[in-house]
Amino acid sequence: MDFAFGPEPCMAIGHDILDIGSRKAQAKRQRGALGDAMSPAPLELGMPGQFDLPNVEDPARYCRTNFASVCGTGDEHQAVKFAKGTTTLAFKFNDGIIISVDSRSTMGNYISSGTVQKIIKINPFLLGTMAGGAADCSFWERNLGMECRLYELRNGRRITVAAASKLLANVMSSYRGYGLSMGTMVTGWDETGPQLYYVDDDGTRLKGRYFSVGSGSMYAYGVLDTGYKPDLTVDEAIELGTRAIYHATHRDAASGGINNLYHMTKDGWKFIHAVDVNDLHYKYAEEKKNAMAT
Amino acid sequence: MVAMAGKDCVGIAADRRLGVQLTTLATDFQKVFQLNDKLFVGLAGLATDVQTLHQELQFRLGLYKLKEEREMTPQVFSHLLSQLLYEKRFGPYFIEPIVAGLDAKGKPFLSGMDLIGATMTAEDFVVSGTCTGNLHGMCESLYKPDMDPDTLFETLAQSLLSAVDRDAISGWGGVVHIITKDGVTTKELKGRQD
């Protein structure tokens, strides 16, 4: 069965019907078949052009205007709003790193989920956080996990946090301008000690002592800046991480749900707690009332 | 916000958030106002217009009472509000109000309006705000005709809380008013504070 489709030459309706309009289909037609439904061509990641891109003049600009995953009301004009909105934080102290996140995912004003796992376990010694576009973060951090494993197999030793974060930052650089949205913190404990790197979608990679990322990050910074000391005990650090996320979820509409908290030690990461932030609200209100009464 | 009719009673409920896009500024903002013994109006939308329109409506009701020497019925009030909004047709108040009250015979009256005064009267429930989709769904499932005041309270509370828990920019507590011929009961709802 043949039919004419726009300015393109006649094409048969087959398994590649979903490729209509993409560059891959056009290139395939020019080159001759490259893979078919039974054995599709392998996806080469990290190289733009290997993903299916819209067949327009400037795919980068098209993607970032129509498929952007931005906070607040930046994507109002889009028909599809991607899942995003969050507060994540991580801070280094003498006994390791505390990583504390919320669990809400919003699509526009709609709360699409209240139970998202925003801490991604890359390997037992590396944790990544998710902020920005949910799909972008989970895909690229899982990809990072794969790269880290390959490094281990090739080199016979665990990858350093600096190298892992560099791998992720390089990938983000190569997709710069395509409207990806990802603000993540790569944390781990390697032979140089506990390390914390901030990596985001325009290729920024920063080493630091503490970061907070997401729409609620400003509220978390307020609490974090006030309470942070390098010589916190583990319990004090956990309390600081919890409180910072609670305040952010209370003030920021796009953050909420459950506070997931992990502690990075020299033996790897340890899951500490998953507490509903609503319960935290009433607990802190009670504490404040008791403190004022005495 | 949402208003529902029961047997010889009406209820109106609203959330408590005041925010600017994603930032929450207050968790005790009043959006439902009692204008006389048997009349409530809920004003959803721009905060400044909520307050201005409330003052305007109080003024007009006061004037009516002085001239007519009787209380305004909800039907007349609804019409007044519609006219007030249409007066600003080319520079409207950014409000989508709902009116809930008991008329002279004690029968429930509910109406909702768009921002330029298109009135819609309903026998069962009216909704307004940012999560009307969620509210419509909750009300359609939970509403039953001829509920008594306690059942009406439960239904309103559950509809509101479940609806706002799926909307990022609504919530942070709630308030429910139930109006019967004997008086008004007001209860604060303990909602999610995130």
Image (cartoon, rainbow, N blue to C red):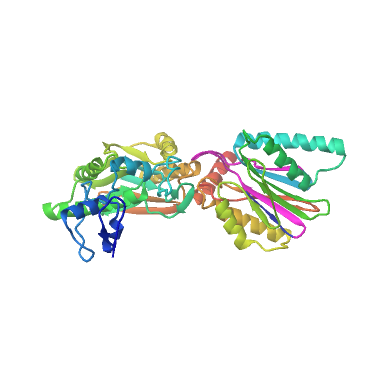
Is residue B177 rendered magenta in the image?
Answer: no
* Frontmost residue, A264 versus A183: A183
Residue A216 in view here: yes
Q: Is residue B135 above or below residue A240?
A: below
Q: Is residue B88 left or right of residue A11?
A: right
Mark yes or no: residue A132 visible.
Answer: no
* Residue found 61% across the figure and 60% down from its top: B140
Viewed as shown, does residue B144 lie left or right of A174?
right
Q: Nearer the viewer, residue A162 or A27?
A: A27
Residue at x-position 73% and y-position 61%: B148
Name the spot of residue A257 as percent of width and height, x first: 46, 51
Q: Quadrant of residue A226?
A: top left
On the rendered image, what quadrant is the C terminus of chain A found in?
A: top right
Residue at the farthest right position:
B69
Question: Which is nearer the eye, B127 or B152?
Answer: B127
Magenta residues, as a range?
B7-35
> x, y (%) of residue A28?
20, 55
Q: Quadrant of the N terminus of chain A?
A: bottom left
Percent position of residue A166, x then y: 21, 42
Q: Residue at x 77, y 35 (%)?
A: B60
Position in image of residue B4 (x %, y %): 68, 55
Q: Main secondary structure of the magenta part?
A: strand
Classify residue A29 by image quadrant: bottom left
Q: Is residue A54 left or right of residue A150?
A: right
Relative height, residue A36 to residue A275 (above, below): below
Is A171 placed above or below A156 here? above
